[in-house]
Every structure is written in structure tokens, then in C-alpha cells.
Amino acid sequence: MGRRKSTITLQERNINWMLTCSDPTPLAFFQHIFPAHYGQATEKYRHILNLALHETGDPEVLNKLRRIKRTVDDARILFDWETWMQQKTAILVRRSVRRTNLHIHEEINSFAQNKSSQLSSESENSRKRKIGDQSDDEYYDEYESDALSNGEDEETSEFENDDIEDNSEGHENEIGGESDVEEYYQVKIDKNEFVQAFDKIPESSKLKLNSGRVVENVLFNYIKDNDYEHLAHSYIINCDDQEIKELFNDEEWTELTKDHFGIPQVPLDIAREIAKYGNKNLKQLREIVMKSFLPDNVSYDNDLHSDLEWIQMTIRTIVHLFENEDSPLQRNHYEYWYTIAFFGICIDILFRDSKLGTDVKRSDAPSYASSNRKNRNKKTKRKLTGRKIDGIIYLIEELHEMGAIEGARSYAGIHDKKYLSEYFKLPKTLRDMLADIIKALNYDGNRTTNIQVFGVIHLGLRVQFSRLWRVGGSITIFKKDQLYKLPHTFTIDKFKSFLKFMISIYQYKMILKNNIQVLRGEEDLEEEETLLLNELLNVGRQQTSPPNT
């Protein structure tokens, strides 16, 4: 019996739990396995439930499991997951307090036991026994070479096991959401290290305006005495930052923040397809989305029709939400609800493009670009993970990241901590992405100035797009674009604003496509083809009148 118990597998243990638990809800299962990742936890719950259904022969247990499977839908799992996240936060806080108390108790005991020896050699030993004492050399040996990453790095093994079950006492907070809001916009800065990093920038590599002023120097003088991190520490200029704007005159500011990219225009066929859903009532929209978007006798081709499919899927999704008698869009939900019920369709599916070779990572995905920056000058073997982002749009083969998605359950004003956190975290993440792409382009100035990375923030049903690009030297510009307030209820006029929102999403796919063309050198080929086309069109056409004969 003892031997059998020692060799029981994790799956068998979970099945036994499912069979014996009086009410095996998703929440109870999460409490049992202590998971950290929503998608994996959900998949595991359903898998164990199905295995338990096939294994049991007890009619009472069978009825219990069938009832659970029948009543537990995606919404119930999502609700239980959000409840588990709150419970997990409280558990981790209690563990942290307990570890702190134990540490203090051990230190007091150690101090008492060694009091006699401490008196005999106080000059040396007292320094070693001081709680939390650490020399400057040790501090800087362990400190990140990048002064800007202090307070936000998580150290992990390069071969970290990303198992769903984590019962270790030292497990860090991977929950995200409201508990980690202050982490990103109140980070202590190491002033000395920032000054040293600034001194290493050659004057020839800085951005000099027509007025003769050097932008890096202006930002450095403004920010050098700050105790907490500011976007200017990363040489990011936020176009909405009035204090930064006041550092420059009108001509300098216009030169510095000029948007030479603009927002690309969507193809005519996409605009026409979206426009056909305008001026329709809800019943008419339902009739349209129930029909194929393809002409008769035309088979679906992913390369040709995926964007058209995205249009219909997005319209069908919001029509379904409008039709729901429980009015889900008028109620408050957790952040994950908006991602699963809506934004996963209208954003993720469009950017998951097999022809472009792009995909979207979700659920607190660590950024490769951020990790690359943090580990660039590290001497230790342990690897630092990148910032955890709600969504990352990336190129699959090269792993180049070109877009970031952040979300929150609601919008509580521009002074809300969550709002401030996201708009501090997002531009820094985008700058890391841009830096990786610039490196991939071998710092080719002509090509790097044609790259812009983008961000999407959704706070409840408010969605705002933003872009970041390099203007010269170490300076990047962060610009917020159109803000959309998506409708809670249906009217024809409100629905037209939603169609405009869909156009905006597609415009950012055009930005993604342009970036890929620059990376692969395809924009040079298109330019050469255009020049050749003009030459061919002008064959035989003389530029000057021929002489009279």
C-alpha cells in the first residue's frame, strides 16, 4: 500500500480529487492545484473532468460530474478564475508575512546565541550579524547593469519549468491586475548609474535640432535629479506630456514630434466590405452574418479571404452580445472577460496572419525584446524575464515583436493607478521592441526610420491605439492615436462608430505589414518595381521636341 501511494501520478491524484470532491467546481480545482496560468488551468480542469467521467462506475458520482460538466461554461470558469486570483493574492501575502516573521525570529535567536562571541570580537562580527547589512560592492555586483530595470526584473532560470502547478512557498506574484499597479510608475532610479550611462553616449550619436539644442542633453538635465523613473530616463518623449513640451519652443517641438508616418489607408475592398454592414438594424445584421461572405461557387482560400472572415466574425460577435437579453455589454466584468468574449475576436484573429507569418501571445506573455535588453550586459548565468504583457503581436520565425496589447476591466479616469501604470509600461515595452528591430536591421538609418511599433490599450469598452518611432539619436516619440468608446447598446449611429473602430484595427495591421516589408527588404523591391514601371510607360516618349528635318 505504501509503495502504491508513493508512485501515484499527478494525473491520478487529480482524478481521485475530482471523484471524491463533493463539489468539484473550477474554483475548488484551482485551489487544489494552485495554478498560475488561466489557459492551462482551464484545459487541465476540463481534461481531468472528462477522465473522471470515463473512469467512475458510481451512479451518484457520475450524476455529480455530469451536472458539473453541463453547468460549467466559459463564463463560470472565468468567474472562478478571477475569484481564485484574488484568493491567491491573499495567500501569497500571508506567506510573505509568515516568512518575514520567521526570518526575524531566526535573527533574534542567532543574535542571542552568539552574544558572548559578539562582545569579544565586536568590531568585526557585529557588522556581519547586522540584519540586512550589505556592502556597496555586493549591491552593485547583484544590481542590473541597466539602471532603468531596477524594481521590475524577475530572475528566472534559463530553463525554467513552466508547470501549471506551483506550490512552492517562494512563488512570486504572477497575478497581475490591480495588485502590481504601482510597480511600473513608481520605480526607484539609481541616479549614479543613470549618469554613467548618459556619459557613455557619444555626442555624435545624439539628436541635434535645427536650433542647435541636443535633445538627450535637455532630457538629462530635466530628469537627472528625479528619485523615481520617468519615461525621459529611457529617452522616450510622450507627446501628451506638457512638462516635457515646455522644455522646447514651438518650432523645436514641431520638429521633434512631427508624425512623418501618419496612419495608413485601408484597401478599398476592406473598406467596402465593412461599409456593407452600415445602415442596418440588428435583425438585418443577424441575417447578413448568417450568410457566407463568399460569392457563389467560390471556395475559401485562407490567403485571400482571411481578412473578410475576420470582418464577419467580428460583426457576428458584437451582434450576439447586443442580442443577449442579459445585456452583457452594460455590466461590469473582469479584464479576462473582455479579452475572451470580444477583443480576442476583433483584434487577435486579424493579427494572427499565416500569410504574414504573425501571431499573438496572450495572458501575461513575457516580452522577448524586454528580456533581451535586460540580459544584454549581464555576467551571471541566470536569465531575467521580460515585462509581462497582456498581449504581444510578433513575427513567428524571427520572434520580432511589433505590437503590445494591455487591458483593464474599466476606465476610472486619467489619474487612476491602473491607467497610469499601463501608460508607463506600454511605451517602455514598445521601445524595447523597436530597439530589437533596429538591431536586426544592423542600425541602418535609412530603414530604421521607416519602422513604427504600436500599442493597443482597452479599458473596459474604451480602446486607444498608440505608436512609437525613432526620430534620431536615442530619442523615440510616443503618440496616442484615436480613442474609441465602444457602444453598450445598439443603435444604427452607434454601430457606425464601431465600424470605424474596425477600420482603425485594420490600419494597424497595415503598419504591421509595412514593418515586415522593411525587415525583409521588400519595400526596396516595390520602389524598384515602381521606377521600372515608370520607365516602361515612358518608352518611346521623348522628353524634348525632336529637331525639324
Image (cartoon, helix red, strand yellow):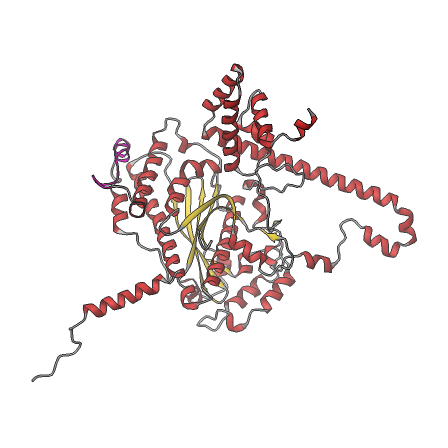
| Residue 289 on the magenta span | yes
Residue 281 percent across, percent down from the top left: 26, 34
Split into 4 quadrants, where in the image is the C terminus?
bottom left
**Which residue is depicted at the point 27% across and 68% down?**
531
Note whether 476 is above or below 56 in the view shown: below
Q: What span is in magenta?
A: 282-298
Residue 349 percent across, percent down from the top left: 38, 43
**Which residue is depicted at the point 56% across and 26% down?**
15
Instruction: Give the camera-side residue of 380 and 260.
Output: 380
Instruction: Give the camera-side residue of 242 and 56.
Output: 56
Residue 217 percent across, percent down from the top left: 54, 68
From this viewpoint, which residue is outermost toward the bottom? 549
Direction from residue 180 to residue 67 in the image, left or right = left
**Which residue is depicted at the point 28% across and 42% down?**
300
Note whether 123 is above or below 211 in the view shown: above
Instruction: Give the camera-side residue of 25 and 94.
Output: 25
